[in-house]
Image (cartoon, rainbow, N blue to C red):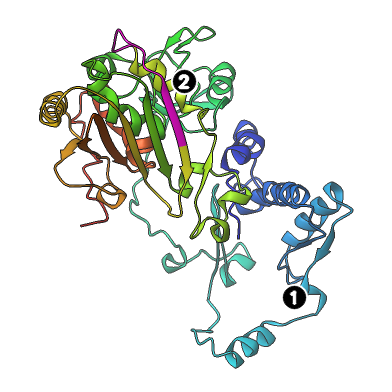
Amino acid sequence: YVSINSINNFYEKIIKFMVFGNVLRNNVYPLSVSSERIIQAIEIVKYAKKNNCDFIAHGSTGAGNDQVRFDMIFQILAPEIKILTPIRDNSISREDELNYLKENKINLNWNKAKYSINKGLWGTSIGGDETLTSYKKLPEEAYPTKLKNKKSKKLTIEFKNGEIDGLNGKKIDVLFLCSGHNKSKLFLEENHIDKTTRIIDLSQDFRNDNFFIKTKRKFIYGLPEMNKSLIRKAYNIANPGCFATAIILGLLPSVKNNIIDDDIYSNAITGSTGAGIIPSDSTHYSWRNNNISWYKPFEHQHLEEINNTLFKQSKRKNNINLLTYRGPFTRGIYCNSYFRSNKSINEIIDLYKIFYKKTAFVKISKSEIDIKNVVNSNKCLIHLKKINDKILITSVIDNLIKGASGQAIQNMNLMFGIDEKSGINLKSIIY
């Protein structure tokens, strides 16, 4: 199956306007789950057209409103694609379904639930005997989330240009921008964000071009092991890329101390989560499992970021030859960088230990390392070896944590004067 993430689209196209207009069904409650169906149907049509599908199927029983929402949108946007509704078309009853499951030895609790609970992003709807009329209240046990506070509470919500800007007099302290590349600039252009709100951007929009003229915001490159003092004073952070984090941390002490004699060669392999959320042939499990391939050889988008960052630290500029791979695993980046140097291995190990001595998450390992040493943690492990005149540096990180969200939280902690390990002092899966 394919999971399509369209949360941002749902907010921009639906929720935002329901907030603007205070839209309520019968002037009583928000359009919660039903409002999602429009975006779901549109995304299904997009995916079906992209993959030249002849059919779209949905599980309507013929009893509810969702069949109308899906059928209408499918017919308008893709009249050439046939709609399949096997349960509705064949008049398959609940009893028929249960008998089929029992005949195939699928044994579960088949007692019909007293309440129908439909959870959505914008809200949860509950159906039962009490909801057939307006005379009865739902009992406490009907709610999936139990009531925690029975006292009334006053909330003051501030709006700017129709969107929520503050709660109870408090502005947003920190804003994480987690949209795709090139979308952060667009968001900041279209939305007023108070200058006192700190921004941490996880896209590549500000890693190389760190001054955004339209909002007059200057972004600091958020690698704590290099820019800790600047991050503490910053209001805007460009969170580093995952490959860039692994490669820069592996090479930074060598570059800064000018011990590299000629070109640098880096080979880095990443898990499937490094490919983002947009489905493609090379992200499907059936293709990825027990398979390996290179992609974007010598021109990966993080290469510019790596060059810009590393060689601000040195008078020399060594050429970096970066070869990236898709790996048959889910999480982690395993990177080998090597170059010629006349320094001894003991000198280099001492140099790395001193450089990273006061860092929270970078550790120098005497033993060889692998990605299980770091997956589920914010750590970067580094191992050093010398063979003849070549220095081999292995660096490993979890691409989702130290390569993305964990590093973003580490940056937030530093910006607010919190212990930088707070919330991310995690153990790896090897333990």
Tell me the crowding category of disc 1: few under 14, some 14 to 19, or many 20 or more residues within 10 angstroms, Cα based: some
Please give the name of the residue rendered at 67% of the width and 82% of the height, measured from the top-left corner: 94
Which residue bears the numbered disc 1? 87
Q: Earlier in the sequence, mark 1 or mark 2?
A: 1
> Which disc is residue 304 wearing?
2
Please give the name of the residue rendered at 81% of the width and 53% of the height, measured from the top-left corner: 74
- The answer to whether residue 219 is above or below residue 408 is above
Confirm whether the magenta stretch covers residue 317.
yes
Report the amino acid beneath label 2: Glu
Nearer the observer, 250 or 414: 250
**Quadrant including the N terminus:** bottom right
Q: In this view, does 294 lie to the left or right of 43?
A: left
**Quadrant including the C terminus:** bottom left
Q: How far apart are marks 1 and 2 (CA)?
A: 53 Å
> Which disc is residue 343 wearing?
none
- x then y, percent, for residue 174: 37, 26
Residue closest to the far bottom:
103
Q: Is the magenta stretch mostly helix, strand or loop?
A: loop
